[in-house]
Image (tube, helix red, strand yellow):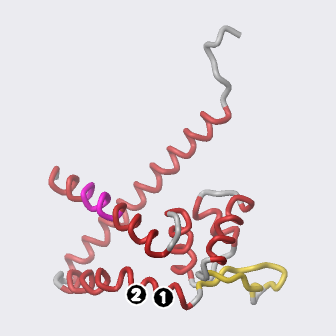
Amino acid sequence: MLEVQAALRALSTEIDRLDGLAADRFGLNRTDLRALDLIAGAGTLTPTALARGLGYTTGGVTTVIDRLEAAGYVRRQPDPSDRRRLVLCPTDAVAQREAEVFGDLALEAQAIIASFDASQLATILDFLQRTGEATARDADRLTTLQSRAATSTPSGDGR
């Protein structure tokens, strides 16, 4: 069990390192790259949904969208179901840059996945989903703690 935890931690470290390098190759900061990943993964995304995904306010996410648009990775378009709203769409430049940055890894990952049988893949998928859910819960917990700390007044100052 300790080896699995150590391997998971090592994987997390390597993913973090890769994210930093990928952000550099995209010419973005890590938050903007994460935003771009959310948009590209969804195909289209509203600014409100992006803000939720990033844990930002809608006002705070506007700057992120502006930077992604200026870099040529995202464009704002009217929502086809409600033309009063906007959706964010990835440009063709995203797929091109993703292929350049992540193409080799994607091929290698496909080969690794193909080396497992269906039962093993089901176990791996279960592990990844449950670990992702636990990670999200812990991130939510830390967000709540930070929010409480930010809104509480300092104590112990004698007043």
**Image height check: is 157 above or below 127?**
above
Which is more toward the observer, 57 or 1?
57
User: Which residue corresponds to the image point at 51% horizontal and 67% vertical from the top-left?
Assistant: 34
Task: Where is residue 158? Give x, y as percent.
Answer: 66, 8
User: Which residue corresponds to the image point at 63% horizontal and 68% vertical from the top-left?
Assistant: 50
Which is more toward the observer, 15 or 125?
15
> Circle 1 — which element?
helix
User: Which residue corresponds to the image point at 58% horizontal and 81% vertical from the top-left?
Assistant: 73
Q: Is residue 94 found left or right of 61 in the rendered image?
A: left
| Quadrant in the rendering for residue 4 | bottom left
Which is more toward the observer, 27 or 90?
27
- Residue under pointer 1: 95
Task: Where is residue 143? Give x, y as percent.
Answer: 55, 46
Crowd class of label 1 (few under 14; some 14 to 19; many from 20; radius 10 Å): some
**Image height check: is 132 above or below 80?**
above
User: Which residue corresponds to the image point at 22% horizontal and 83% vertical from the top-left?
Assistant: 118
Task: Where is residue 101? Give x, y as percent.
Answer: 38, 80
Q: Is residue 85 found left or right of 23 in the rendered image?
A: right
Please give the range of residues in magenta.
8-15
Instruction: Name the amino acid, label 1.
Output: Ala
Instruction: Name the amino acid, label 2.
Output: Ala
Asked if labels 2 and 1 touch by Cβ distance under 8 angstroms, the answer is: yes
| Quadrant in the rendering for residue 132 | bottom left
- Residue under pointer 2: 99
Q: Is residue 30 found left or right of 18 in the rendered image?
A: right
